[in-house]
Image: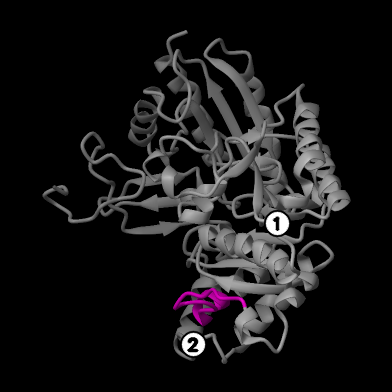
Amino acid sequence: MPDAQSPIWHPFTQHAVAPPPTLIARGEGARLITPDGRRIIDAIASWWVTLHGHGHPRIAAAIADQAATLEQVIFAGFTHAPAETLARRLLARAPKGLAVAFLSDSGSTAVEVAVKMAVGFWHHRGERRTRIVALEDGYHGDTFGAMACGERGLFTEPYWPMLFEVERLPFPRAGAEQATIEAFTELLRQNGGTVAALIVEPLVLGAGGMRMYPPWVLKALADLCRQHGVLLIADEVMTGFGRTGTFFACEQAGVAPDLMCLSKGLTGGFLPMGVTLATKAIYDAFYTVDRAKMFFHSSSYTGNPIACAAALASLDIWQDEPVFAHIEAIAAQHRKRLEGLHARPEVVETRQTGTIAAIELCVPAAGYFAELGPRLYRFFLERDVLLRPLGNVVYVLPPYCITRDELNAVYDAISEALTLVSV
């Protein structure tokens, strides 16, 4: 039964062993504030969504204004100015070649849309290309198509019989990157004519343990896609909107994908929304007088005007405020503090890409279900720091408004927490 105090079933929570959830009354900047006044540093941007800080007044005002004007309208056969403007502004910042935007309501649905578009593209061209290729340890969401693209594991085991098969490439770990490229080369040599798309999280695997790989690997994989006519899906749900140091991670590799999935930071962390950007060639495969070839996908809140207004306000902040200066400052502070942790015997490895930092800790049984993870979570929360380790991997992914003192407090808590690690 649910907790006696609440009927809510929380995500990624084993209620039989988890402590009661922390009640939050409001947010302010990089802080989450409880009813009794505790000020908790949100060092993971509330699951990677909060860009400019909690309660940013410009986004809050844009939401209020839009809610008083138009809160919702069916998006089949109708449109509105916030959606039209948002699509144009996103495409203007996106890699060259992306020409149309399909709006949805989450990262998972943005991925579902991309996969359906990729397979439908080949179907409408009369080619039977249905195979999807992905990186091992990848994560693309929790709806069924997104689950299928992600790594098979305890997350998805009950549903394996219901998931379509996906070809896996080895993760391009440091020193063995070429093995990934060679594996994709061989797969395409043998079965290239049946592959619809390669889907990747560019540069950083999020839920897979904040594993990182260099831009040249992404470029090599993209080049192979081009050579063999395979579509490239860039899942930038987590890496987009500055997280890796550039607005989109693909920019660092000079890669223009055929499909790009966006969500999380899209609205600045205020409202759920997803967007799938696609090339004109993909759009044209569905563009015909045959109504049976339309793209059959929607959700009730597709193109929600309030979410669009929040996203536009977030883009305005990028334009008018020194967001990249904040990103560079966070990245520099990460580098400095990681140097002090790298040589500690409790630390296996430290990793960083832009504003994303990860510390992999030495434990006998590593991985998401490492017993150390829940202990660390409680330890950090007792010190008014929200960090949610991925098993034995502690990662820091803060809002861009975090101050130097706040980020130092996060790292001080991490340094103190290493006493929990038995080497």
Q: Residues within 10 Å of mark 2 (few under 14, many from 20)?
A: few
* Label 1 close to label 2 by CB (< 8 Å): no
- Residue 46: in magenta span: no
In which image quadrant can residue 345 be found? Answer: top right
Q: Residue 205: image x %, image y %?
A: 61, 40
Q: Is 241 above or below relative to 212?
A: below
Q: Residues within 10 Å of mark 1 (few under 14, many from 20)?
A: many
Q: Residue 294: image x %, image y %?
A: 63, 80
Q: Is residue 318 left or right of residue 369?
A: right
**Disc 1: which residue:** 129
The type of residue carrying mark 2 is Ile
Residue 74's tag is: 2
Q: CA distance from mark 1 to mark 2?
A: 33 Å
Task: Describe the element under mark 1 as helix, strand or loop.
Answer: loop
Q: Is residue 208 visible?
A: yes
Colouring mode (rainbow / by chain / secondary structure / one colour): one colour
